[in-house]
Structure formats: C-alpha cells, structure tokens
Image: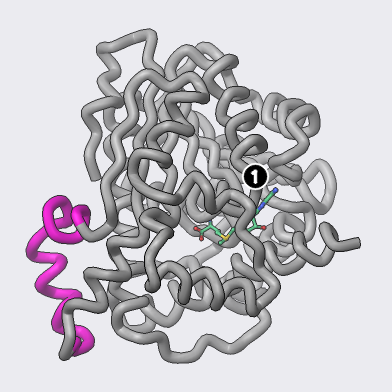
Amino acid sequence: SASVSDDYSVQKTNDDATESKYAAIQLKYWEDPFIDHFIHGCNDMPHRRDPEISRGYWARTAAVFSIVEQFVEKVGPSAQIVSLGAGFDTLYWRLKQKGCNFGRYIEVDFASVTAKKIRLLRNPHKTPDLASFFSEKLAESHHTDLHAGDYHIVASDLRQLKELETKLFTTGLNKAEPLLVIAECVFVYMTVAQSTELLKFFTSNFQNVSVINYEQVNMTDKFSQIMTNNLNSRGIVLPGITACENLETQKQRFLDSGFDYVHVWTMDKIYREFLDKIEVARIEKIEFLDEKELLSQLLDHYCIVNAVKEANSKLDFKNITP
Ligand code: SAM
C-alpha cells in the first residue's frame, strides 16, 4: 500500500542523517567515536557533503547536545529522556562519555530501524564496546526491543499511541519524574493532528515535561520549495509541513498540546547568537565558504523549539537556551 512504501522512504531518512553526520565527523566538525558502528547499517557509502550541510549538522548536534546536557544538570540522576524517531542517533553514548548521569534514556523508532540498531550496536568486533556503557547488562526482550538499565530501545509506530504507551511504560518510565522528549526531524513525517495527539499524551501523563523539537520552519518561500521538491522527488512526503510555515505556527502546535511555555529560535539565530564562538571559529576553518549568504538562508529554514510544562517551577526548564 501507499503507506507502507511511504514508511520505507521515511526510514531511509535515517540513513541520510547518519551518512551526513558521518561525513562531517570524518572532517572533524565534532567528535563521535560511536557513529562508526552504525554507518555500516546504511545503504550508501557516505560521500562528501556541501560545507553548508556539514555546518548545519554541526550546529544542530551542538545545540541539541547543549539543551539535553542542561536538562540533565538541572534534574540530576533521576532525569528521563525519550528520543522519538531516534534512528541511529548516538546521543546516549556522547552524553555518557561526557560523564552525564540520568535515570533512563529511551529511543523509539519503527521496528525495522530498531532491529538494525540493536544488531549494529552489539557488533563484538568493534570498539568502543557500546554495551559496556549501559548501567545494566543487556537483556533483550526480542530482536526489536532492548532493555539495559539506563538505556532502552522500543519499536513502535509513533502514530499508534496505545502501542507506544505500553512500550514506554515497560521501560520503567516514571510519570512522577521529569521528562525530556527529543524530536529531531520526526514530527514532519506525520500529520499535525497525529503529532498533536502524541504531544498531548506527554502533557497529560507528566507534570514536568519539556520537548525539544528540531525541524523545518519558514517553509513558504522559493528556497523552501526547492527543499521540499528535493524530498518529494525521493518519495519522501512531509504531511506535517503545515506546522512549519513560520515560527508562530511552530509555537502554536505546542501551545495547543498543553505546554505552558514555548520558545522557538531559528538555527540561524542559534548559530550566530548561542553557539560557542570559539567552536564556531574552529569549524568555520574546516571548509571554506566563499558565500555566507547560502548558509544563513539554509539555517533560517530550520528551528529548535523548547516547549515546557512544569508543575515544579524550580526545575526552570523554561529558561534553557541552546
Ligand atoms: N532523530 C534522528 C536524527 O536526528 O538523526 C533520525 C532522524 S530521521 C530524519 C527520522 C526518523 O524518524 C527515522 O529513523 C524514521 O524511521 C523515524 N520515524 C518517522 N516517522 C515515524 C513513526 N511514525 N514512527 C516511528 N518512527 C518514525
């Protein structure tokens, strides 16, 4: 059916993300000794990316890392993190490598993606040993789900809330403890009605919950037409694009889903105003850009949202910036 083939194209977007990150990591935009395990699960051999793309991935990785790290610092070891549509993301290991301690880190994706991730992370011939980072010995319930103390992978379609709910609570996710939800390039693949239901699930079950959403914004001009046509031509449909029209539409969908405070920044603003200036200077030396305008245009078409519901205002998630 159409939806099966669409789901297949959507899962391929994870290969795209992994390959682009791998290419940037090879050029030393940032360090990630963990991605090597996962690049072998992708379909194409990574090729060189335009410098704008690598800078964009660097900014996205740096900004998300910074927000997650601050959340964990505020909450402490009981912090819970759920990564929606996590794909082959290595954030769990990068946080642990930096000495971050949290209660639970749960990744969700389609079964075909989680099964692959589990197989790749267990590769006994590769270093570092990814399973050695888990707080408990790895116990696999079946080949698509993994439970290992502070690290869990569960297979679920994010549009099937009943299944998702059951899966999330088998990991020991605790409604009484603060939760950070990460959605990096995920909501755009479902309708706004579906992502709103998903967000409401979190605001109705948790008293203290923050969502980090990274995705497209300002999708109304010529530049954005080229971006969407490029995806459409590869069979990728973006049913959620209507929420990406501008910063206001991005903000509104979170207010409609039960969040009290919503901050949204374009990646251009984050790049210019929030990210570490020394790091920016370092990565700008890696590859020369003769025209800075294109980078700024590209970054203006992505944003990060921090949406917060906090019963305990002492947690102060609402003042976290990238
Ligand atoms: N978050 C990762 C990152 O930033 O590198 C991967 C992003 S990739 C563009 C989108 C991911 O979301 C894919 O792994 C895809 O399988 C997953 N995804 C999209 N729609 C989904 C759904 N309805 N249920 C579960 N996973 C979904």
Tell me if 163 is positioned left or right of 66 in this view. Answer: right
Q: How many marks?
A: 1
Residue 187 seen in this snapshot: yes
Say whether residue 243 is magenta: no
User: Is 77 displayed left or right of 231 in the figure?
Assistant: left
**Ligand 1 lies in which image quarter?**
bottom right
Circle 1 residue: 191
Q: Secondary structure at mark 1?
A: loop
Position of residue 293 relative to residue 279, above or below, is below
Majority secondary structure of magenta residues: helix
**Relative to the observer, which residue lies in front, 188 or 8?**
188
The image quarter containing residue 268 is bottom left
Residue name at image x 26 percent, y 20 percent: 316
What residue is rendered at 91% in x and 61% in y? Answer: 1
Q: Residue 12, position in %: x, y?
A: 67, 70
As rendered, which of 56 and 245 lies closer to the eye?
A: 245
Q: Specify start and end residues of the magenta stretch as a single range.
A: 269-289
Residue 45 point in image, percent of width and height: 58, 89
Residue 273 is one of the magenta-drawn residues: yes
* Residue pictured at 14% horizontal, 83% vertical: 285
Residue 215, percent from left and from top: 44, 53
Question: What residue sits 19% from the left and 54% below the top?
Answer: 269
Image height of 182 relative to 209, above or below: below
Q: Amino acid at mark 1?
A: Thr
Of 30 and 13, nearer the camera is 13
Q: How did the renderer colour the structure?
A: one colour
Identify whether 43 is placed above or below 320.
below
In terms of image quadrants, where is residue 83? top right
